[in-house]
Image (cartoon, rainbow, N blue to C red):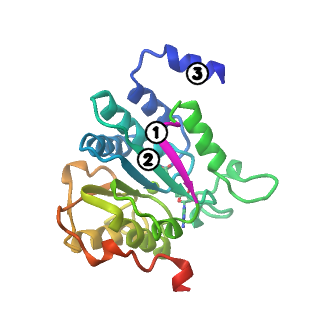
């Protein structure tokens, strides 16, 4: 641990560059060009004065580190402090479970036989000396969203990609984007042969809601970025519905 701290202290790279290197070295599903686009939006949100960013789908911390490298860059330019609230139950999505395409056996806890990515996420933040910029929010995304009261300068949706979890994430978290803030969605594939439908469908819904406009310049790979129009207060914003299992079962 001392070695990690020493290496960080002696590195000639700036903090945001070290965080980018850490992101690239962390297990996950975020290609570098898309991660850099995400970092640029986090930087803009922080420079605009927003103090919180929400990430839905933390996994082992790769996209978290891209996001906080953007915050770190903004801080170096004089922005006020901001943090990423990184939401995940750390049990993996359907596609991460045993027998599915994106399963990784090294993320299974030997004692319980269940996936647990939280220790990996936590270690990644520690190794990158980034614990001041990221807060783990551990639990079911929809349960958390239904009770979350803080508007975010950026909400990044990259959680479960099935029909039910993707729509619940949209319904739960899109209302939490502040006026003039950003909504980023990962794994948006206009061509069905490239990937699953739900992230594309929620992106289309966000656009057709009239509450967001697309940031075309930020579009990179399967990353899409939308910006909430000021004054686009919708009924859905004051009371997020359909996302709380305890009231909808
Ligand atoms: N953003 C990460 C990848 C996220 S993978 C990266 O770039 O590397 C999707 C994550 O969503 C998984 O870690 C899974 O545990 C989480 N997830 C899926 N459904 C969830 C839910 N309902 N609540 C909380 N987390 C969920
Ligand atoms: Mg993804």
For disc 2, the marked residue is 84
SS assignment at label 1: loop
Residue 232 in which image quadrant: bottom left
| Count of numbered badges drawn on the protein | 3
Q: Which residue is mark 1?
A: 133
> In which image quadrant can residue 216 be found?
bottom left
Q: Give the position of the N terminus as an image quadrant.
A: top right
Q: Between disc 1 and disc 3, whose residue precedes?
A: 3
Query: Which comes sooner in the sequence, label 2 or label 1?
Result: 2
Question: Which badge, 3 or 2, is on the more N-terminal residue?
Answer: 3
At a point 58% along the width and 34% down the height, the residue shown is: 126
- Disc 2 and disc 1: Cα gap in Å? 6 Å
Q: According to the image, label 3 marks what residue?
A: 5
Horizontally, residue 11 falls left or right of residue 123, namely left
Q: Is residue 172 visible to the viewer in this orientation of the structure?
A: yes
- Mark 1 vs mark 3, CA separation in Å: 17 Å
Within 8 Å: ligand 1 and the Cβ of disc 2? no
């Amino acid at each position: 641990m001392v070695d990690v701290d020493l290496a960080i202290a002696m590195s000639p790279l700036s903090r945001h560059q070290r965080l980018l290197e850490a992101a690239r070295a962390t297990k996950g599903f975020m290609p570098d060009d898309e991660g850099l686009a995400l970092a640029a939006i986090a930087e803009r949100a922080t420079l605009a004065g927003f103090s919180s960013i929400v990430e839905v789908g933390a996994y082992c911390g790769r996209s978290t580190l891209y996001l906080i490298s953007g915050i770190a860059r903004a801080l170096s330019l004089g922005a006020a402090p901001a943090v990423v609230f990184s939401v995940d139950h750390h049990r993996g999505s359907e596609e991460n479970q045993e027998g599915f395409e994106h399963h990784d056996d090294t993320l299974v806890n030997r004692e319980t036989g269940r996936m647990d990515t939280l220790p990996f996420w936590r270690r990644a933040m520690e190794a990158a000396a980034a614990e001041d910029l990221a807060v783990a929010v551990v639990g079911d995304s929809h349960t958390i969203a239904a009770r979350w009261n803080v508007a975010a300068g950026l909400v990044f949706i990259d959680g479960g990609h099935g029909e039910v979890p993707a729509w619940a994430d949209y319904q739960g978290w899109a209302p939490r984007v502040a006026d003039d803030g950003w909504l980023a969605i990962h794994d948006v594939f206009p061509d069905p042969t490239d990937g699953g439908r739900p992230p594309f469908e929620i992106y289309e819904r966000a656009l057709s809601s009239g509450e967001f406009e697309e940031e075309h310049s930020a579009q990179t790979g399967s990353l899409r970025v939308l910006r909430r129009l000021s004054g686009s207060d919708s009924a859905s914003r004051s009371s997020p519905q359909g996302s709380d299992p305890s009231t909808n079962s």
